Amino acid sequence: MSLGEYRGEEKLVIGMDLGTTMSAVSYAHLRDGEEPRVHLIMKWPGQPAAAGDCKVPTLVRYNAEGKALLFGRAAQLNEDNLENTYLAKWFKLWLHPSAMCTEFDMTPPPLPPNVTVKDIYADLLAFLFTHTRECLEGTIGGSVRDSLWTRFKSTFVLCLAIPNGWDSAQQGVLRKAVVKAGILPLSEAASRLTFVTEAEASVHFAIAHADIGSWLHKDNTFLVTDAGGSTVDTVVYKCTSAWPTLTLAEATSSECVQAGSAIIDQAAVMLNDFEQNAKRAYDGSAGSDDAVVKTGTNLTDRACNVTKGRLRLSNAEMEQIFAGPLNEIANSIDRAVRRAGRGSSKEPLRLLTVGGFAESPKLKLFLKERLAAHNILLITVDEPTKKAASEGAVYWYAKKFVVARAARKSYGVACNLAYESTQPTHAARLHTTYTDASGKMMIPGHFSQLVGKNEVVQNNVSARLPYYSLSPSKPNLSTLRVGLICIDDDKPGDWCKEADGELMPRFERACTLKADLSGIARSLKPQRHEVTNELYWRIEFAVEVFFGQTTLFANVVWEEDGPVTVIASSVN
């Protein structure tokens, strides 16, 4: 399907997908009035040039002092000759929120000594970016003789694809890693670094590569599942316009489960050969031959089904390895469909699958059979040599077909309420009440909701609620901080804090909004306590948050709008 022309300023956009097991980089020279053409970096150090593989293993090898030595394929070769070194792999799992953990106990390998997750990402990003820059230095920018890199080295935009289950905390780690890697200066990271969810990048990839024009029409609903190394993301989209401009809206909050192909690798006995051969070929049909995995030795052990270094896995054993993740994926798709609803249309839903794990014959067959009973058709985007999220991230930046998104959590602010004795929930918290500077009895810990889980929000529409703060002395208006909190629940209730001021179970801090309100200092007038006649100051403001974006945008608003900084919560 044609993406249509790009409209906007001429730009160089670089898209990166830092996968659990494999990474990839794409780029496009966007010019106004031309259809975007995305190119993949097809050659990587340590990999045969003739292979033409855009994917590079997400591996970094360190010495004991924490210095990065080798990357990608080179980091996993000749391990016997690399004494006193440490391989960083699957480190993406360390960033996954606890809510994404599943029954499979996918424990990430320990980090090498003297390095953090941010350090590893910074080193990996530096490796990927350095090679990308070298490729761009040899690429001429259209009719201009200068290379793309010469023209855009100080203005290029970097777009990172991230799991749907990641929030501002994980984005904050990557943002710091990009700066540490020397890719962007801190002063420009907010404007030249963007994030897109893997599923949203994948739907743009699917639009570019799949023949969906024959069935995609206004009010049509379809699903996209991006099955990767550690996570599987599923989003339900509704087509809100097909002509003259294609626009999509999320029909419900996305699903993100830790049920990727790496779980199957972990369950297998001999990881490396299993990942490269047996896993990719297995389809699970009744007549399937036994799977053979090379152990790297010439061992023969009939009791263990090993002959001359080859471990034979029966069809039943392979079925057991695949069963857990496949059921988790199917269940996540079922949940998304139930929340979104089928509407009145009798037309079958279509599920577009992308990602490395989506190439598995077993996954295709399993989903086809499981979903057929629910009138869901499976459509595979047949581009096995490509990394959908990397390429899709660039298409996303160019076109941005998705104009509305569903909140994955309920977001709000912890505030105080005026005590009302007739309210049962207030009476139950009588012991927490206090008298504020104006003389009113207040209850702390109320959850003032800005947006609810599964609520669909337009890109350009904000949620705004008014608040105020009282101070017995003239406040320092240059340091106003407002905490944004969230909970994975569509019915969070009225309260978010315990009597001791701590957050109640399942609530978490999403970020902190920091604003400078010194502009209203002159207009701020003191008021007097009704009984004691003591002075106090009342600051009135509003919290405004744009939830329909791929990255959280927020403002603290008063009589004159002012700048705000979003400070990500730390990752545990």
Image: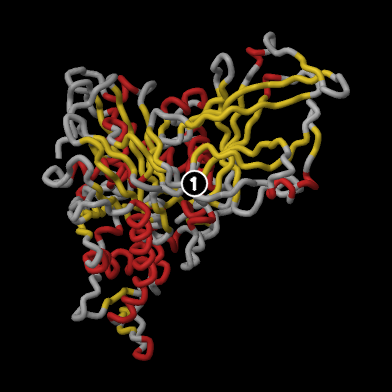
- Percent x, y for residue 72? 38, 50
- Percent x, y for residue 546? 46, 32
Residue occupying image coordinates x 27% and y 35%? 401
Q: According to the image, what is the colour scheme of the structure?
A: secondary structure
Residue lying farthest to the front in this orientation? 422
Residue occupying image coordinates x 32% and y 56%? 337
Q: Is residue 240 visible?
A: yes
Residue occupying image coordinates x 21% and y 76%? 285
* Helix, strand or loop for disc 1: loop
Q: Is residue 128 visible?
A: no
* Residue highlighted by disc 1: 409
From the viewer's perspective, tell me whether residue 339 is left or right of residue 500.
Answer: left
- Percent x, y for residue 321? 36, 73
From the viewer's perspective, tell me whether residue 504 is left or right of residue 200.
Answer: right
Is residue 332 positioned above or below 17 on the image? below
Of the residues shown, which amino acid type is indicated by label 1? Lys
Q: Nearer the viewer, residue 394 or 502?
A: 502
Q: Nearer the viewer, residue 466 or 39?
A: 466
- Percent x, y for residue 221? 25, 48
Indicate the quadrant where residue 4 lies: top left
Residue occupying image coordinates x 28% and y 47%? 387
Q: Nearer the viewer, residue 399 or 389?
A: 399
Indicate the quadrant where residue 374 lies: bottom left
Quadrant housing the N terminus: top left
